[in-house]
Image (tube, rainbow, N blue to C red):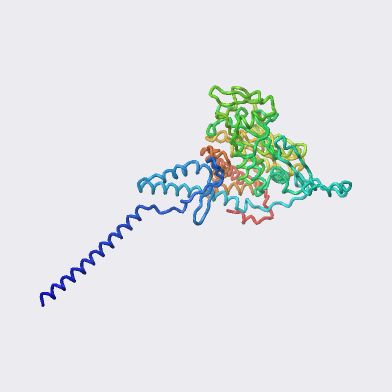
Amino acid sequence: MARQGVGRLSHSVCLVLACLSLALHLILALFCLSILQTSCVIPPSSSSSLSFPGTSPHGQQGRSHSISSQSSSHKLPTSLMNGDFTKMASFNMINEKEKDKKLIVAKMATKVSQQVSSRSKLEALFSHPLYNLPRPHLQEDDWLLKLKPKKKGEDSEEEDEEEDSDKSSEDSEWQSDSEQDGYDRANWTRSAETHPPWLRYHLGIARWELYDRNDPSVAEVIQQMATQRILSAVQKSGGTQLKLIMSFPNYGQALLKPMRQERDAETDFNLFYFSDFERHNAEIAAFHLDRLLGFHRIPPVVGRLINLTTEIRDITTDHKLSRTFFTSPVGNLCFHGQCEYYCSTENPVCGRPQVLEVSLASMLPDLSLAPRRSWRSPWRRSYSRTKLAPWQKNPDYCDTVKQTPPYSQGTRLVDLIDMVILDFLMSNMDRHHYETFEKFGNDTFLLHLDNGRAFGRHSVDEPSILVPLQQCCRIRRSTLMRLRLLSLPGFRLSDVMRESLSQDPLEGVAPLLSVQHLSALDRRLKTVLQAVHTCLEDHDDVIHDDLQGYDVSLYRH
């Protein structure tokens, strides 16, 4: 009996130990499996979900792209989507080693972080109080154009006819039925809702600026110039180089300048400034820089790819222009038009093979509606290979200018200094004249037109452009404070310029300004601030206080 009891006890103990051993093995197996699964799965990134609004059915991306995450959404430039993101997305679809996958994700996160940081600089700049100053109260005469008031009793004889007409035609100011020519059917009334964007932009031109940065009409004008069908193309008369006037279905027009050289090509140092090509990307960049400086004195400009065959040669009614088209030895379609310089078969404009990069600048109101006056710049160059201009020989030249109307009163002198600073930053030596709207007399802003010879050299600066500032030692307080703001790391001029240019359609093809040109902006900005600092040390009456009456402490940084 004792032996049987001991045997049963031993059997029970062995059974319990076997169960414990099995349970431990199961727990160990589950633990190892969970570790293996954790090590093989890459943690999802907050930017793992990508969306690109504006992508066309044919795979072409639009100008605005976004990264969607659980908590934020950021717009990215086209260059990101066309470059690293496309490559990274393809890499993630390949079954690579764990180390390579982690490296790819890390690089992607770095790129996103850099672009989001850059994007925030432009938003922060335009949110700064210096870029949101209260606008001066505008009187009726401070608007360039206005709709004709409806006179009382003017339509009394036609009341019966109006009652029978369609309501949509009541109070019509202008109607058109020229749909057979490709133009939109127009029925414009006094209501702004019936006006095309370019007309609303024209009606928004005021005494002190060409446009309001927050006016949605400006963005619409830019978008339509970049996308609308081109109905007509004719050469613009006058000027030294080739320019075309393009017409759109909504009766808007734009001034076209073609691509003449590669964007990273520097102007030959042996050429005089008046022998340089005009650059399409310089016109685009000048508009963005003028806006970043808070001037708003350059008409809206946008880049576009056009087809030389269907959008110029086949639709032009300019026979002199059409006769200059030819096919190059390598099969590219070329033309040269007729102008004073660079309009010959030796200097043609050529597509690749038919596609051409161009800049399109919104046209100003017709001269019959808004006449403009052309002013010869006091610091105009001699445009001679041997002679010097008076300001180059007389260091006290500005003393004479200050006593000469219109520079002897008002804001004309500091308006010109604003233009000088813009020209120095983009290295534009070709500012021989400037224009103003006649209606506003001498109390108005200067139009910063024709900037095609800017951004020619990035490796050297042209100190002679800055001579008016150095000789006159006058500058607006608001201009100086914005320049100081753009010199800070959080608002660095090159960074906000890069981001602003990323909104242009041509940025998806290649950067509109090279890294060297962007770096030159920061270098030249330091030179401008140093010139002002020297003036402040040597003179008392340097600052023109256009912020008088405002709490300047609100605008410090």
Could you tell me which residue is drawn at 52 percent across and 55 percent down?
Answer: 72
Examine the image and state in which quarter residue 440 appears: top right
For the residue pair 68 and 440, the one nearer the viewer reads as 68
Q: How many labels were placed on the picture?
A: 0
Q: Is residue 312 left or right of residue 206?
A: left
Examine the image and state in which quarter residue 3 appears: bottom left
For the residue pair 100 and 137, the one nearer the viewer reads as 100
- x and y, in percent, of residue 403 in the image: 73, 39
Which residue sits furthest bottom? 1
Q: Is residue 37 left or right of residue 242?
A: left
For the residue pair 38 and 205, the one nearer the viewer reads as 38
Q: Is residue 295 visible?
A: no
For the residue pair 164 and 378, the one nearer the viewer reads as 164
Q: Please, is residue 325 above or below residue 125 in the view?
A: above
- x and y, in percent, of residue 137 in the image: 73, 52
- x and y, in percent, of residue 344 in the image: 62, 23
Could you tell me which residue is drawn at 56 percent across and 45 percent down?
Answer: 54
Q: Is residue 327 visible?
A: yes
- x and y, in percent, of residue 287 in the image: 62, 41
Could you tell me which residue is drawn at 87 percent across and 46 percent down?
Answer: 158
Task: Name the quadrant of the N terminus.
Answer: bottom left
